[in-house]
Amino acid sequence: MSTLQGPRAPMSHVTTPAGERYDGAIDLSKVRAAHHALYEAREEMTADGNTAAALATLQMWQCVIFAGFPITPSTKYIETIASKIAADPTTKKKVKLLEAEHAVADYLVGAAAACRDLIFPTATSSVGLDHMTETTRSLGASGLGNVMIVNVYRATANFPLCIEGDPSDALAHRDDGFIQICARGKQQIYDTVVQAPCLGMHPEVMTPTMPGYYGIKDSHRNARLVVEPDREIAAFHDRWIRPSELPGLINGDTAFGNCVTSRHFQGFKISQKQRMERVLDVLPKLGADFENYFGRPGLAFFDAVGFPDDGEVDLAVLSMGPDFGTFEAIREAYGKRTGLKVGGIAMRLLTPFPRDAVRHKLQRAKVVLVVNQAHHQGRGHLTLDVADALSDLEYAPRLVSAFAGLGGADVSEPTWERMLDFARSAHEGTPVAPYAFFHEGSLL
Amino acid sequence: MKVFDLRRVLASSVLEIRGDGKAGGGLVLAFQSLGNLFLHDPQTHVQEWPFFSSARRGANIRSFLRVSQKPVTAVCEVTRPSLVLLMDDGAANAIDFAQGVPSGGTFVLNTRRGPEECARHYRLSGRVITVPGDDIGTKYLKHPIGNVSAYVTMALAIGGFEHDQVIEAFLRMLRKRNVPEAVLARNREALSASFGGIREGEYDCCGPGDHLSQPFAGYGELPTGAQTALRLSESNRTAHFAPSGFRLRFEDSNDACTGCAHCIANCPEGIIRFEPHPELGVKVSGAQVSQFCKLCQECIAVCPEKLFFRAPFEEHWQEEEITIP
């Protein structure tokens, strides 16, 4: 950090309830000036998901230290960053390869608390995220919205070991206190990572972010990507990221693990929950501004397809991740063949779950088919969220729960058709099981 | 049988391509470069991705590519490709690289053999194109890596690209990986030489039951702790993940085994054969190589008497028929 420090003259020492503050210890204008633009103009390329996420963080002038520890399938994120930094010997940016993921999370805490105007990203997967847990739970409550953990989804159970995309790691960490946003496709990954700090560092929110995408299916899948010039990303951030109310270096009481008694604990948690709930207000505004600025869709609660203006559909699918694209590819043909109106939504915002928006979108569906792709001991993570969202409707749609694609298994077109048939039988009044597994066009 | 034009497939729907090879053989780079080749046309959308198994060098891997004039939304695996690539003969030992290809499809093989021999051996109906990519790699890159030639051959099979365009798209991918100029120059030579090594023909050797997609037969019984059971199952022969062209051999004609049991303890697959011995405790007699040996070479490394070693073989070409498990 010393290479990025400004002149000592303007530094002042202030004692605050949040700790000892050393205003001016870091000259942000110098940090900004020291940034070497990766792209001077808008450029098109083919890239995989890890590269898209890495480029987005490398282009942010506020990202100066990249702490990390490699784990499949997120490894290429830190590899890409390291290779770009190594290729520019004059850059002041650093990669900090640590002993393990727990150390990475601890490092993020220290660095992010020390300077709340900079952004500290890393990427991890599966048991890497599990290993961070002791610290991510603290981070979630910390107010350090300048921490971003890019979660490359991978089955979290280590027996049997599986390196492929399955969001069970993200869904097992719903209560860590991070804003969790699922992206699918290269462009959405890039755009999501660009927007995430605007959300997390918003003064009403102040909550760390966890943008994520499916391992292998998106992390290793190449497609066309448009990257924006660094100066435009900085200009967009300037519209949303205000100087922290706790500027400069902070020392002292920002240490984690402080003990409070029951007299105060609940109060902290209520405050944390309120900040998280404000995401539901801020995110749509941020997404709309992004679209206005860059001309591509910005953050949203979900992607929707096939809903008419009145919202009435016979069958609505709710899922997440890239496999939803296969559903999109067959949706029209399936609807024509069966004579049903079929719509679908792919969740983007996982935490906090946008209950009201989901309820509003699905309230006029006759049947809702929820496709879960992570191991769950009940009817499925998403199923429970949707059941909660629909619970207070006078005439709630019938809820059908499916599992498919666990461990990154292929969700083929015949599998989607079989799941839709399963939901169709519920539409026709046939009793269906509380949940069912599907693979290769079969109900298992 | 009518061979179909891949450019027409692309113009009317989605051109789907699949490749099979071994990890470390450059299959992914070949597919990434092919996807990159379409980038000059802003109306063309590509989607390229690999499927890894145990992700170690020598393991079977697959690559997929979809190309379309419309945005590609489907992300499921390609099951009826119009063009397939067999990058490594050894990969065809474990999978049917031609599975699901409609009659009249295009088959690209990285091999020294001619198209007719390959069409008969693998029972292919359609356009069969071969290129001795490993030989070209050995000559120009000092390494038997055929991905450069396989990429060129696929690009020519699709058609519509200029010679220089094909070369530059591949080199662009290498530059993204910060490959030094000297290596780029050697790759340029290998790319150019590949154009001259391509042979092709049209054949109709596929029988009615060949290369059909197998329906999903369920997972069977997977008892608690089933990783071990999977390893022992007939359908998950881990020997298929071994580097192609070699086999583990055990020879103890001088009765030199000391019964130290290091090989037994270190073999991750538990396939070392041994018998009780009154003086030594145990005596090693070999290993169950054909089914489960991944050729990790642990036994070779630990045996104090050097009784294990790697030996070359070309088993799959010696067989009269291909056996698909």
Image: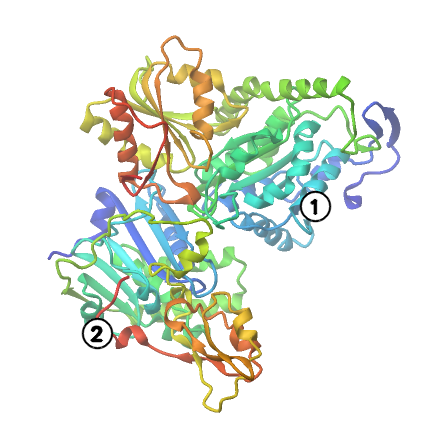
Which chain does the residue under circle 1 lie in?
Answer: A
Residue B192 visible somewhere in the drawing: yes
Residue A38 visible somewhere in the drawing: no
Looking at this view, is B94 or A342 the one in front?
Answer: B94
In the rendered image, the vertical position of residue B263 relative to residue A177, given as above or below: below
Secondary structure of residue under mark 1: helix
Mark 1 lies on residue: A103
In the rendered image, the vertical position of residue B252 relative to residue A151, given as above or below: below
Q: Residue A386, position in %: x, y?
A: 44, 22
Looking at this view, is A103 or A75 the one in front?
Answer: A103
Task: State yes or no: discs 1 and 2 in contact (Cβ < 8 Å).
Answer: no
Q: Nearer the viewer, mark 1 or mark 2?
A: 2
Position of the N terminus of chain A, as image quadrant, is: top right
Secondary structure of residue under mark 2: loop
Question: Badge 2: few (under 14), some or many (20 or more) residues near its Cα, within 10 Å?
Answer: few
Question: Badge 1: few (under 14), some or many (20 or more) residues near its Cα, within 10 Å?
Answer: some
Q: Please state which amino acid type lies under the numbered disc 2.
A: Glu
**Quarter holding residue A18:** top right
Q: Please state which amino acid type lies under the numbered disc 1.
A: Ala
Q: Residue A102, position in %: x, y?
A: 67, 44
Looking at this view, is B143 or B294 the one in front?
Answer: B294
Which chain does the residue under circle 2 lie in?
Answer: B
Q: Residue furthest bottom?
A: B254
Q: Residue furthest top?
A: A394
Does residue A256 appear to the left or right of B323 in the view shown?
right
Does residue B279 appear to the left or right of B44 in the view shown?
right
Q: Residue A119, position in %: x, y?
A: 67, 36
Does residue A333 appear to the left or right of A89 in the view shown?
left
Q: Residue at x 31, y 75 (%)?
A: B315
Mark 2 lies on residue: B320
Does residue B280 appear to the left or right of A325 in the view shown?
right
